[in-house]
Amino acid sequence: MLEIIILSLHFFVCFLISVVIWCGSKVLWGSLHDRETPLLFDMDLCSSSKGAVEMEPDAPVYVGKEDDIKKSQRITTKVNDREVVIFYHEGKFYAMDACCYHAGGPLRLGEIEDINGQPCIICPWHKYKITLETGEGLYQAINPMEPSPTPRWRSKGVKQRIHKVTIDNGNVYVSPPDLSVSLASDYYADKCKNNGDFTMEK
Ligand code: FES
């Protein structure tokens, strides 16, 4: 008889515990949905995930205000420790490695010219022409087989590393480069990193 009473008490206590757990979970769930302000642990989660985005190595890097760059037309800055020049030319932003692929000349001091329908930066040191859009080196060549050979613009291929520019809410961002393919300007990008302006003799 005593065993039956103990067993009944045991079942009753288990039943009470289940009811308490069920009610508790409902109250907690309701409070999570009804609240207007985030709980402390939510804020921690948000701030830590935001921090992770900022530290993400491929995340675009803020380089300045859209209006300021439009006014100055060009700035140089560092993007993930790489010297980059940003141009604003005829309504478009362009970004490329700041040191010329040929011998490290300071492209921020170059003139922009339209060559063959493409805006190009002319390196101030040896006048190499680099397209702002693609980073191709342009040169003129003639075909001696033509009856009257005429110089025409040709491409050496992409030589200068171009960086993607995005505008968001009046802020300008430059994306870090994909370095899986190496380009000629990478060599001088390393030297610029250490020296700021690369000061090799012209
Ligand atoms: S360093 Fe730019 S053309 Fe020579």
Image: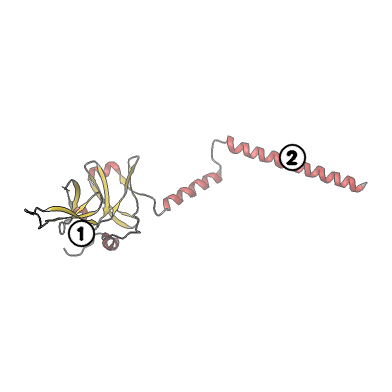
Q: Dividing the image into four equal quarters, which quarter contains ligand 1?
A: bottom left
x and y, in percent, of residue 178 in the image? 35, 55
Q: Secondary structure at mark 1?
A: loop
Classify mark 1: residues with Cα within 10 Å, few (<14), some (14-19) or many (20+).
Answer: many
Mark linked to residue 105:
1
- CA separation, marks 2 and 1? 77 Å
Amino acid carrying mark 1 in the image = Gly
Towards the viewer: 158 or 87? 158
Q: Is residue 37 left or right of residue 112?
A: right
- Residue projecting furthest to the right: 1
- Residue projecting furthest to the left: 148
x and y, in percent, of residue 82 in the image? 31, 57
Can you tell me whether the CB of the residue at mark 1 lies under 8 Å from the nearest atom of ligand 1?
yes
Q: Is residue 55 left or right of residue 28?
A: left
Q: Secondary structure at mark 2?
A: helix
Residue drawn at point x = 33 percent, y = 59 percent: 181
Q: How many marks?
A: 2
Residue drawn at point x = 44 percent, y = 50 percent: 53
Of callouts 2 and 1, the N-terminal one = 2
x and y, in percent, of residue 185 in the image? 26, 59
Amino acid carrying mark 2 in the image = Val
Towards the viewer: 137 or 60? 137
Q: Are marks 2 and 1 in contact (CB under 8 Å)?
A: no
Q: Quadrant of the C terminus?
A: bottom left
Mark linked to residue 195:
none
Can you tell me whether the CB of the residue at mark 2 lies under 8 Å from the nearest atom of ligand 1?
no
User: Residue 36's quadrant in the figure?
Assistant: top right
x and y, in percent, of residue 3 in the image? 90, 48
Residue drawn at point x = 33 percent, y = 45 percent: 166
Towards the viewer: 43 or 33? 33
Mark linked to residue 19:
2
